[in-house]
Amino acid sequence: MEFLTHLPSLTAFAFTLMLTLLLPRFMERLRLPGPVGYILAGIILGPHALGVLNPDGKVVTFFADLGKLLLMFFAGFEVDIAQFNRARRKAATFGLLTFAFPFALAVAVAASLGYPPNACAVIGAILASHTLLGLAVVKKFDLMGREAVVVTIGATVLTDMVAILVLAICLPIHLHGFQPKAVLAVLGWLVLYVPGILFGLSWLARHALTRLGTTKAARTLIMLTAIAIAAQVAEWIGMEGIIGAFLAGVALKRALGEDTGDDSLEVMSHALFIPIFFIAAGFLVDFTLFFTTLRDQPALVIGVLVALFAGKWLAAQAGGRLFGYGPADRGLMFGLTVPQVAATLAVALVAYGTRDPAGRRLIDEPMLNATVVLVIVSSILGLVITERMARKSRPSAPEPTAAAVAD
């Protein structure tokens, strides 16, 4: 296979596009989410298998970085502001529960395995967020207006944002050590930065779109500029760019409302840039080390999985009972909050790539490998649970809907 490492750039690019097109569809036939196929493509094309793509190449690095920002941008952009406002109190309560339970259990597991406190907090944040892979299932069963679903969607906003903010606080501690003034400075910047992006960038984008947004190119460039500004300012104040990209998505959604305009950027992002981010994640998987982790550190892998499933189940049971939901709705909340893909991988990869002055990573390679296992297992079981609970939740009698949410 050595000849594959010397393929012309255009041939390697075409080979990459072919796998990017075929593998996600193959995964979907196996009832797995598409991103698993992209990660598999990265494993195949990366340095530990065929070696077709150079993980340190400037083009691959740039596309992967842009894909990471766009992934978080569209995670924020997909937030339904009206739905969140209708169920904000219950959504906030469940968001705190579904973050706190897996976070606490993950921190306990990581601490018992000898990870330092800062790494424990990041590992907790990795598990505490979730990706709403099951929304397609919920839509298929016409349950998008169900109160439990609306509350879970709103809770996702909080869990992802808090997970990213935990990362923002832990990064400078890892790089420079715990300095109370530095931590307070980060928190102070956050207090200014978050509303500044949510409201200031939203106002600027609204005016720019009014004046310049008459063409597809103008709208796309304005959105990219907003992402770049938010991400760059985040890095200037010592945070990670994905925080800015996520907030930029929420801000642009506020600016556009339901008039989302042209979807050219979204199409290109999901067709090229975001897949390359997941492909780059696959570069990091060395199967020798991967299976070594499973063999030598089963407590890490099992502990992470138990922390996730137990934490999300406890949160769904506590929140559902507090709101008066039945078993099917509580199961639906559990199934929707189990899958770990977007924010999980983004936080894990940023933490893995962050080294202190001594060269030590914020999270190590075994934890990264455990995260890959987590993504695959949680995606499969989360979708299975969601579909089973969605079948049980189809109302035979009138049930609470989003319009009936009482705050």
Image (spheres, rainbow, N blue to C red):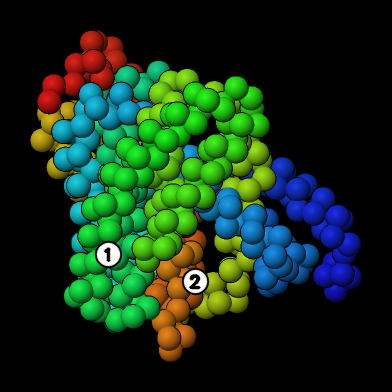
Position of 211 compared to 163: left or right?
Answer: right
Give the class, few, some or many, for how many residues have Cα within 10 Å of label 2's Cα (few <14, many ≥20): few
Residue at 58% x, 68% y is 285
Disc 1 marks which amino acid? Val
Residue at 52% x, 25% y is 211
405, above or below 384, in the image: above
Badge 1 is on which residue?
A: 186
Q: Can you tell which mark lies on residue 275?
A: none
86, above or below 131, in the image: above
Residue 43 x %, y %: 65, 63
Residue 303 found in image quarter: bottom left
Q: Give the CA separation, mark 2 to mark 1.
A: 20 Å
Residue 398 x %, y %: 23, 10
Residue at 42% x, 43% y is 248
237, above or below 17, in the image: below
Disc 2 marks which amino acid? Gly
Position of 186 compared to 324: left or right?
Answer: right
Label 2: element kind? helix
On the rendered image, what quadrant is the C terminus found in? Answer: top left
Give the class, few, some or many, for how many residues have Cα within 10 Å of label 1's Cα (few <14, many ≥20): many
321, above or below 344, in the image: above
Badge 2 is on which residue?
A: 353
Is residue 207 something one can see in this rendering?
Answer: yes
Nearer-the-camera pick, 50 or 211: 211
On the rendered image, what quadrant is the N terminus found in? Answer: bottom right
Nearer-the-camera pick, 283 or 207: 207
Position of 292 compared to 108: left or right?
Answer: right
Residue 358 x %, y %: 43, 89
Residue 332 x %, y %: 31, 33
